[in-house]
Image (cartoon, grey):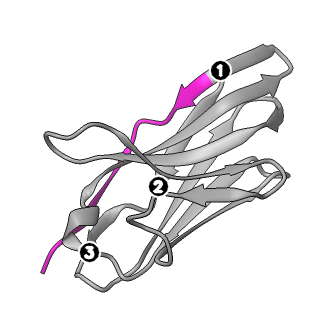
Amino acid sequence: QVQLVESGGGLVQPGGSLRLSCATSGSIFSIYTMGWYRQAPGKQRELVARIIRGGSANYADSVKGRFTISRDNAKNTVLLQMNSLKPEDTAVYYCNADRIVTSQGVFYDIWGQGTQVTVSS
């Protein structure tokens, strides 16, 4: 079984920073795309940023220049560095992996349980 576990959320003042981490469990050979999504109350889940195995990344327009996604392929982890946070960044942030190749087979569209980020003074 493969699991994604997020950490690093919390309460931060506007203009502050947080770093989210997503760790994996299981006997993993490779993960193609890893990404961060978020869902604010009353809104649909939206893409924040995603990064392919080779390192190319793309971002939502709303976070460009403020957030940075990175990954460690050896550790099968993905990070999201969030700077200059705004109240509108408040949401539950979810880690996602589109395809995970393991010793037990291939798993698709895996989600973590989410971590709350609240930006407020």
In terms of secondary structure, what is the magenta stretch mainly?
strand
Q: Position of residue 79 (x, y in %)?
A: 60, 61
Q: Identify residue type, mark 3.
A: Lys
Q: Amino acid at mark 1?
A: Tyr
Q: Nearer the viewer, residue 35 or 112?
A: 35
Image coordinates of residue 13 in percent, x first then y, are 22, 81
Q: Is residue 32 left or right of residue 74?
A: left
Left or right of 25? Residue 5 is left
Cα–Cα span, label 3 and label 1: 32 Å
Tag in front: 1 or 2? 1
Residue 120 falls inside the magenta stretch:
yes
Q: Quadrant of residue 107?
A: top right
* Mark 1, secondary structure of its residue: strand
Mark 1 vs 2, N-terminal side: 2
Spatial CA span between label 2 and label 3: 19 Å
Tell me: residue 75, above or below residue 61.
above
The single residue placed furthest to the front in the displayed view is: 61
Q: Earlier in the sequence, mark 2 or mark 3?
A: 2
Q: Residue at x 64, y 54 (%)?
A: 78
Q: Amino acid at mark 2?
A: Ser
Q: Which residue is mark 2?
A: 7
SS at badge 2: strand
Q: Tell which tag, 2 or 3, sits nearer the viewer.
A: 3
Residue shown at the point (63%, 35%) measured from the top left: 97
State the SS at label 3.
loop
Magenta span: 109-121
- Mark 2 Cα within 10 Å, few/some/many (few <14, many 20+)? some
**Mark 3 crowdedness (10 Å alpha carbons): few <14, some 14-19, many ≥20:** some
In the image, which disc is placed on residue 86? 3
Q: Considering only order in the chain, which callout, 1 or 3, is on the residue closer to the N terminus?
A: 3
Percent of width and height locating residue 47: 45, 46
